[in-house]
Image (cartoon, helix red, strand yellow):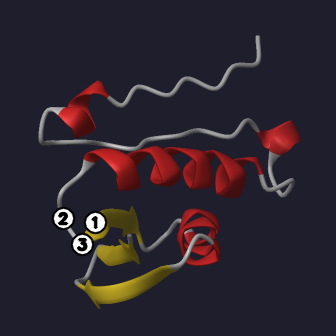
């Protein structure tokens, strides 16, 4: 079964988590980038902050690339994560 599930209620209630999994046959086809772009567009309309805050494991360069393709930049990092921000 293929599905994209978008749930914005946590973001609307003051906290959010954007998590996604792209099955191996669908990787490299920009599904993660497009899905993140859709949810970022929704988040821009419901959050009060000036930026969308994201975190990605350093061992997940594909997700970091998806964030960067959606306007994200690495704000800071630690040993395990890159902390990314996308301007509204």
- Left or right relative to 74: residue 6: right
User: What residue sits right under mark 1 in the picture?
Assistant: 53
**Residue 40 rendering spot, x and y as whole percentages:** 47, 54
Q: Residue at x 84, y 41 (%)?
A: 26
Depth order, front residue of 26/11: 11
- Left or right relative to 23: residue 68: left
Q: Residues within 10 Å of mark 3 (few under 14, many from 20)?
A: few
In contact (CB < 8 Å): disc 3 and disc 2: yes
**Whole-Å distance between the Cαs marked 2 and 1?**
9 Å
Q: Residue at x 18, y 57 (%)?
A: 48
Depth order, front residue of 43/81: 43
- Left or right relative to 10: residue 39: right
User: What residue sits right under mark 2 in the picture?
Assistant: 49
User: What residue sits right under mark 3 in the picture?
Assistant: 50
As drawn, the residue found furthest toward the left would be 14
Q: Quadrant of residue 87?
A: bottom left
**Whole-Å distance between the Cαs marked 3 and 2?**
4 Å
In contact (CB < 8 Å): disc 2 and disc 1: yes
**Whole-Å distance between the Cαs marked 1 and 3?**
10 Å
Figure check: 35 above or below 78: above
**Residue 85 rendering spot, x and y as whole percentages:** 34, 76
Q: Residue at x 87, y 39 (%)?
A: 25
């Amino acid at each position: 079964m293929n599905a994209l599930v978008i749930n914005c209620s946590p973001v609307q209630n003051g906290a959010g988590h954007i998590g996604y999994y792209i099955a191996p046959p669908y990787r490299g086809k920009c599904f993660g980038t497009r899905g993140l772009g859709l949810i970022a567009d929704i988040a821009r309309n419901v959050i009060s902050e000036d930026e969308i805050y994201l975190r990605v494991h350093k061992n997940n360069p594909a997700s970091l690339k998806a964030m960067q393709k959606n306007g994200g930049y690495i704000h800071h990092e630690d040993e395990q994560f890159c902390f990314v921000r996308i301007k509204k």
